[in-house]
């Protein structure tokens, strides 16, 4: 995020948008970097993810009562909810609460401690959480837009709450980034990108791509 801040320092951007909220790690880094100098907006196609963050900032935390295999199974098979995001989605590789393993119900306390830290950061600003695709903010201008899409060389799929899996249209996404880059400062986290994009090495195989 420091690279993004430095690159945009000469411009007076008042808006930060995250189009693939996911586990929220990048958003927390952005808040720590930009603090209250911008307004924050974040979208995700998973309803549970959005419900989770909306609940978290108002004081919600997962209940120890739910921390058992039978209850977790019921939650994961049930409707969208903050609990579904926590017990299912945040035990993934990219989730910021990945200490928790819903299959064994281990490390629940460590995961909740991380939630408390995340909540304390989120409550320092106001964030608009929206259940929508990355194209939701297609009309904005003069904004910093951070995208962490499904990686083409990895799974390259969208996974919905209901278990539906669809292939992510990478070509359409990069065309959208080109269009948005005309009036905004768009940064994409990926392993690889189109040849017309510049890139900044982040770590390992991960780069930030931008025009």
Image (tube, rainbow, N blue to C red):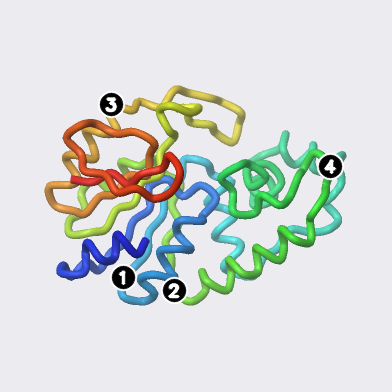
**CA–CA distance between discs 3 and 2?**
34 Å
Looking at the rendering, which quadrant does residue 101 occupy? top right
Looking at the image, residue 93 sits to the left or right of residue 13; the answer is right
Looking at the image, residue 119 sits to the left or right of residue 171; the answer is right
Task: Tell me the number on the disc at residue 125.
Answer: 2
- Few, some or many C-alpha atoms within 10 Å of disc 3 (few <14, some 14-19, many ≥20)? few
Which circle's residue, 4 or 1, is located before the other in the chain?
1
**CA–CA distance between discs 1 and 3?**
30 Å
Residue wearing tag 1: 38
**CA–CA distance between discs 4 and 2?**
35 Å
Name the secondary structure under disc 3: helix
- Few, some or many C-alpha atoms within 10 Å of disc 4 (few <14, some 14-19, many ≥20)? few
Residue wearing tag 3: 171
Task: Tell me the number on the disc at residue 104.
Answer: 4
Circle nearer the viewer, 4 or 2: 4
Circle nearer the viewer, 4 or 1: 4
Circle nearer the viewer, 3 or 2: 3
Looking at the rendering, which quadrant does residue 204 occupy? top left
Which circle's residue, 4 or 2, is located before the other in the chain?
4
Image coordinates for residue 180, horizontal then vertical, percent:
19, 45
Name the secondary structure under disc 1: loop
Which circle's residue, 1 or 3, is located before the other in the chain?
1
Q: Residue at x 38, y 39 (%)?
A: 190
Name the secondary structure under disc 2: loop
């Amino acid at each position: 995020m420091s690279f993004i801040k430095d690159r945009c320092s000469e411009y007076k951007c008042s808006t930060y948008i995250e189009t693939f909220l996911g586990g929220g790690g990048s958003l927390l880094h952005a808040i720590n970097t930009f603090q209250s100098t911008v307004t924050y907006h974040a979208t995700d196609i998973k309803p549970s993810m959005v419900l989770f963050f909306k609940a978290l900032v108002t004081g919600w935390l997962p209940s120890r009562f739910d921390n058992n295999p039978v209850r977790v199974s019921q939650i994961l098979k049930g409707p969208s909810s903050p609990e579904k995001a926590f017990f299912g989605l945040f035990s993934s590789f990219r989730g910021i609460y990945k200490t928790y393993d819903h299959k064994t119900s281990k490390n629940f306390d460590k995961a909740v401690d991380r939630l408390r830290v995340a909540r304390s950061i989120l409550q320092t600003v106001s964030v608009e959480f929206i259940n929508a695709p990355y194209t939701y903010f297609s009309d904005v201008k003069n904004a910093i837009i951070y995208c962490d899409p499904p990686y083409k060389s990895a799974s390259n799929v969208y996974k919905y709450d209901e278990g539906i899996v669809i292939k992510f249209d990478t070509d359409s996404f990069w065309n959208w980034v080109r269009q948005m880059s005309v009036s905004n400062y768009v940064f994409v986290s990926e392993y690889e990108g189109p040849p017309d994009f510049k890139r900044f090495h982040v770590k390992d195989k991960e780069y930030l791509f931008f025009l």
